[in-house]
Amino acid sequence: MKLLFHFAYTNFSNTYVVGPEEPGNAILIDPGVMDIQLLDLIEYHHYYVKYILATHAHKGHINGMGTIRKIYKADLYSGSESIFDVPSHRLQHGDRINLDGIEVEAIGVPGHTGNSLAYKINNMIFTGDALSAGTVGSTVHNIAEELNIKSIREKILSLDESNLIFPGHGPPSSVKIERRFNPFLGGESV
C-alpha cells in the first residue's frame, strides 16, 4: 500500500491518496482542491480514484470533489447522506468498509462539525480538522469543543501509540506524540 500527499496552497490543506503498490483503484481523502499537481500525482502512479473519503463538509476539504468526480466517477463516503448535493455513503463511528482490499474504519469525532469522521487505514489515522499536531479543531462553542476533545481522547488517543496521524492541516504526528505533548488533550505544554 502507498500513501501519497498533496498540499493545497489555496487553502493550506492536506489531501491524501491511498492506493496499492501497483497501478489500480485508489482512495482520495479530503480533496480540498483539484489542481494539476494532484492530477499529476494520481496519474504518475497510474491510479484511478474510485473512492473519496471526506472527514467533514467544509469547503477547504472538499472543494475539489466535483472536478475529481467528473474525471474519475468516484464514490463519496462521509458522515452525511450528501455533501453539496452529491450523494454519499453515510458512515458512522465503528463502521468498517473494504475498498478494493483496503480496510477502512470510520472513527466518529464530532465537535469541529457534528458529523466529523476520522479514518483509520492500517496504522494511519486521517483526522481532518478534528486533530492536528499540537492542537484540536476549532468549534462554534464550548460544548462542541468539549465533545471534540472527549472524542479524540476516547477514540483516537486510546489506540496504539505507534499509529500515525495525518491531519487536514499541518504536519503529521502520532498518537504517542499527541498523548504526551498536545496541551488541549492534557499533554505537556510545548
Image (cartoon, rainbow, N blue to C red):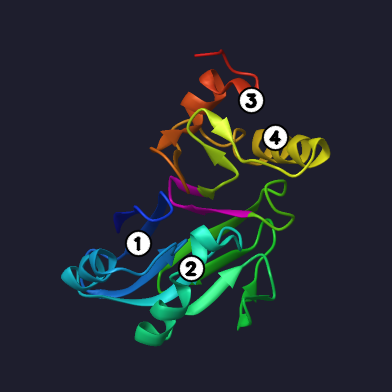
Residue 104 appears in the rendering: no
Residue 135 falls in image quadrant: top right
15 shown above or below 80: above
Residue 81 appears in the rendering: yes
Q: Are marks 4 and 1 in contact (CB under 8 Å)?
A: no
User: Residue drawn 40% across and 86% down?
Assistant: 70
Amino acid bearing label 2: Asn
Residue 137 falls in image quadrant: top right
> Which residue is more in the foreground, 164 or 36?
36
User: Residue drawn 57% across and 37% down?
Assistant: 159
| C-alpha gap between disc 4 and disc 3 | 7 Å
Q: Which residues are magenta?
A: 117-126
Q: How many marks?
A: 4
User: Which quarter of the rendering shows the N terminus?
Assistant: bottom left
Query: Which residue is denoted by mark 3 in the rendering?
Result: 184
| C-alpha gap between disc 4 and disc 1 | 27 Å
* Helix, strand or loop under label 1: strand
As drawn, the residue found furthest toward the left would be: 44
User: Residue drawn 46% across and 73% down?
Assistant: 65
Amino acid bearing label 1: Val
**Of label 2 and label 3, which has the lower sequence position?**
2
Label 4 Cα crowd, 10 Å radius (few <14 / some 14-19 / many 20+): many
Amino acid bearing label 4: Ile
Query: Which residue is denoted by mark 2 in the rendering?
Result: 63
60 shown above or below 72: above
| C-alpha gap between disc 2 and disc 1 | 16 Å
* Residue 153 image offset from top left, x and y in percent: 67, 33
* Residue 5 image offset from top left, x and y in percent: 31, 53
45 on left or right of 53: left
Amino acid bearing label 3: Phe
81 shown above or below 132: below
87 on left or right of 22: right
